[in-house]
Image: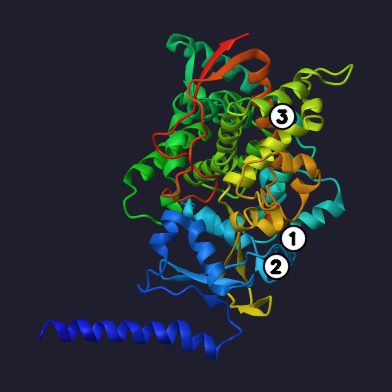
Amino acid sequence: MAVFVPILFASLSLIAWRLWKFTIIPWLHPQEPRELPYWVPFLGHTGSYVSNGHAVLLRARNYVGSREPFAITLVTRKMYFVVDPEDAANVYKNTTSFVFDKVVQSLQRTFGISDETMTATWKPGYDHAASGEKIDDHDKARKLSSKSLGELSMDFWRMQTVGTEGYNDLETKFSRYINILLSEQVDRAASNAGSIRLSHLTNVVLVGAALRALFGESLLEMQPDLVETYVAFDTESWKLWFKWPFAKTMYERKALLENALKRWVEIPLERRPGRSFLIDTVERTQRGLGTSTSDLAKIMNLIIFVVNTNTYKVCYWGLAHLFNSPSLLSKIQAELTHPPAGEKSMDLAYLRNSTPWTSALFHESLRYYSASSSIRATSRPAVVRGKTIPAGSVVFLPFRPQHFDPSIFGDDADSFDPTRFINDKKLCNSPRFRGFSGGSSYCPGRNIARMQFTILVTSILEKYRVQVAKEGVPQTDSKIPTKGMLAPKEGEEVVLEITRR
């Protein structure tokens, strides 16, 4: 009896707390987004969200019973979610109430960049003269002088990957390095009867090409195992976002990357040729602020992560489906081997503009396997669909519920079908499809990512014979948390038998 009383008291207290928090408070404050109820105070839905975030979001949407915003408690903090496409579009447009800069700053701090560097980087009125940059256009100089280096850095990304500053050069480098690395992997596979794991192929070729295209040859000459170290870190990087307590190996790999990059930035510039516009500009401007080499290495590590974390994974899934679908394979082979008269199939302009089935495969792979979200911070109370989200809140705009919504993508939304992007040519640029986020976080690397995918597919089909050793596309592993592309279930792998034509 003595044991029963405390248990009864604790149970009644928990029931009373839950009734108060999830019934009475919502009734008293109907203007606030409703929260998905939970039984464990403080932790909320952390455990279930880590193991299967998409399922938690669907539960919350069903609990609310409409497309209005809702809240979920994760690790003691209430997070807000906007799942309706029209509401999300309004959030993207409202850059006054929903800000992205704070999210970027949080990401930079997560990578360990010091407060001193953060303060200097985000201080308005960056002094261009400090980096040795001379701007003759006075109107341009006046506009730029009002921005912080943090804001300008996002402009540097767009100039490299969308604008004119070095995009064509970067695209050409990617093409060259993808072909070189692909050839090397096929030669190595020959010693294993031509067999190679698809995950290994996409990791080595695409991450290796990206590092060389951005940093030149010197980084990997100095640290040959950097690709393997990065992929190992990226596999466990979810522990960084969730501040996971059992993450010693992940932090060790992160430190290995930073140490290699620190040694690289300490090498004289003349011994580091081939740097891209982005890397060169970020290094020069950060040094102009007096950024330490330790922080500069962490900034470079963050660039590597942002550039690579999704591309090699979407290529993996696209190729997994391609080599398991004879009809899709024949369509893509046709557009790559029968270009219009006077054009060469490996011409980059042709690949960029005249390969609709390859493009459809890329976009469907993003739709089907992306578990990403856009994130915003509220600078003041903001109203979405009649619900008020408090100032200082973190707001997620998840893509997956939208991408699997039958009212948006049809009754076959649960099926992998690139044809949807063929039947609707405007779908890849529609607000219904958020493969590249939106608003101020609209992915600046979207064009180069699609070109990497297209170049890899084209190179494989033109130069090599490929068969799958065992048919079937792996299942996704819902137990591994992710903020990007889903991973294949452990133990399931696509093995290719690949030889030269």
Please identify the residue farthest to the front as the structure is shown.
Answer: 411
Q: Which residue is rendered at x = 62% and y = 23% of the image?
A: 178
Quadrant occupied by the C terminus? top right
How many numbered circles are shown? 3
Q: Considering only order in the chain, which callout, 2 or 1, is on the residue closer to the N terminus? A: 2
The residue singled out by tag 3 in the image is 171
Q: Which residue is rendered at x = 48% and y = 27% of the image?
A: 200
Examine the rendering and report whether any part of residue 344 can be seen: yes
Q: Secondary structure at mark 3?
A: helix
Alpha carbon separation for disc pair 1 and 2: 31 Å
The residue singled out by tag 2 in the image is 87
Q: Classify 10 Å Cα crowding around label 2: few (below 14), some (14-19), many (20 and above).
A: some
Alpha carbon separation for disc pair 3 and 1: 32 Å
Please identify the residue farthest to the left as the structure is shown.
Answer: 2
Q: Considering only order in the chain, which callout, 2 or 3, is on the residue closer to the N terminus? A: 2
Which is closer to the viewer, label 3 or label 2?
A: 2
Query: x, y percentage for residue 327?
Result: 68, 27
Q: Considering only order in the chain, which callout, 1 or 3, is on the residue closer to the N terminus? A: 1
Q: Judge by depth and name the residue closer to the eye, 200 or 248.
A: 200
Q: Which mark is residue 146?
A: 1
Protein image colouring = rainbow
Q: Classify 10 Å Cα crowding around label 1: few (below 14), some (14-19), many (20 and above).
A: some
Label 1 is placed on what type of residue? Ser
Q: Residues at badges 3 and 1 in contact (C-beta under 8 Å)?
A: no
Q: Residues at badges 1 and 2 in contact (C-beta under 8 Å)?
A: no
Q: Which residue is rendered at x = 74% and y = 60% of the image?
A: 146
Query: x, y percentage for residue 455?
Result: 68, 26
Q: Judge by depth and name the residue closer to the eye, 33 or 256.
A: 33
Alpha carbon separation for disc pair 3 and 2: 35 Å
Which is closer to the viewer, label 3 or label 1?
A: 3
